[in-house]
Amino acid sequence: MKIIAIESSCDETAAAVVENGIKILSNVIATQTEFHEKYGGIVPEIAARRHSEVINYVIKEALEKAGNAKLQAVAVTHGPGLIGSLIVGLSAAKALAYSLNLPLIGVNHLEGHIYANFLEGKNPPPKFPFIALLVSGGHTMIILVKGHGKYKVLGQTRDDAVGEAYDKAARYIGLGFPGGPVIDQRAQKGDPASIRFPRGMEDKNGGFDFSYSGLKTAVVNYAKKYGLEKLQSEEETLNNVCASFQSAAVEILVEKTIRAAQKTKVKTIVLAGGVAANSYLRKYLNLRAEESGIKTHIPPIALCTDNAAMIGAAAYFRYKNTAKKAFKDNLGLSASASLTL
Ligand code: KG4
Ligand code: ZN
């Protein structure tokens, strides 16, 4: 079964054709970073306008790269995300579904991130049940996944998402947007033990919840005290700040995820979301999981950040496991900025 999937929840306009939920026939992404960079973050109005400018070309390219494969369904992210951005992708998907007389499958963006792990790669797909650590610019969650579409959220952030903390810390110290990749690179050259930044909700009473606003504020306060200009002129200190921030941000994610797997007696951990591209998170999770006798699944970096192939994968498994009439005449599907799992 070949599905065309469309993703436009944030600042990437993406379309992909995926076969049987696992095989990527095409995966096209038009990124908007350059349009938002100078504002230090995503401007929703610019994002929506840019999506509407490029979406038809992105879809066309995805179809061509897939050899204009015969499609059997249209999938689209309908939340959570920026409402104006979501509506552009949803409208394009509805137009396609209507004109080609195909079922329309609405996908939760968060679910899509998890299903990036089902796309064909070096490893076979994860076996249920598993614990998913979902870390992105908008979400930080530990989820028990018992089967296709069966989610139980065990913990989540009480304030900022981890990706948001990366972006805000980087913005304050003048490292640009998005902050994740830059901090990640600089951290590799710095000393993680040089500054002790707080690890939010570290003690066991914090359960599986997280807090990242304290870490972000600690970086801002450190920079103010040290002198922002002085900090920016010292490569080594800047790298040390990045490394210390990264170890505080990442280690708590991993420790709580391992604890969640142990508590639920689950033997597999799956990593998902944009922050899953982080080199230290990938390394440290593998290390701690191996020590604890737990198997890990980590998507290739290109499938961690927003893309449409992951939406096609999630859509296929949902379609397969749901009564088909739910997807027929589905043009009333609406966008929801705060859609939950
Ligand atoms: O999943 P995603 O592409 O979009 C959302 O759904 O939010 O995630 C974007 C987030 C941004 O906050 C970005 O800074 C972060 O992922 N990110 C990283 C890395 N690459 C992207 N964070 C840490 N290290 C990275 N290498
Ligand atoms: Zn995302």
Image: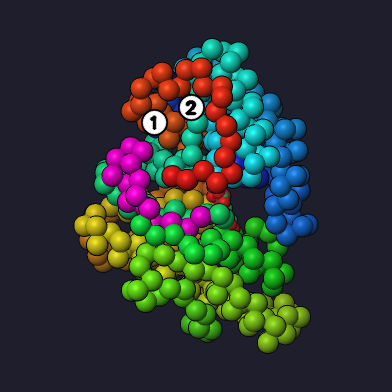
Instruction: Examine the structure image and report whether residue 27 is included in the region drawn in magenta.
Output: no
Q: Position of residue 229 (x, y in %)?
A: 76, 80
The single residue placed furthest to the bottom in the displayed view is 225
Q: Position of residue 54 (x, y in %)?
A: 71, 32
Q: Are marks 2 and 1 in contact (CB under 8 Å)?
A: yes
Q: Position of residue 96 (x, y in %)?
A: 60, 19
The disc labelled 1 sits on which kind of residue?
A: Arg
Tag 2 secondary structure? strand
- Quadrant of image for the C terminus: top left
| 182 or 129, nearer to the observer | 129
Q: Residue at x 75, y 38 (%)?
A: 49
- Quadrant of image for the N terminus: top left
Give the residue pinned by disc 1. Answer: 318
Quick check: can you spot residue 35? yes
The disc labelled 2 sits on which kind of residue?
A: Ile
Whether residue 189 is situated above or below residue 266 in the rendered picture:
below
**Which region shows up in magenta?**
139-153
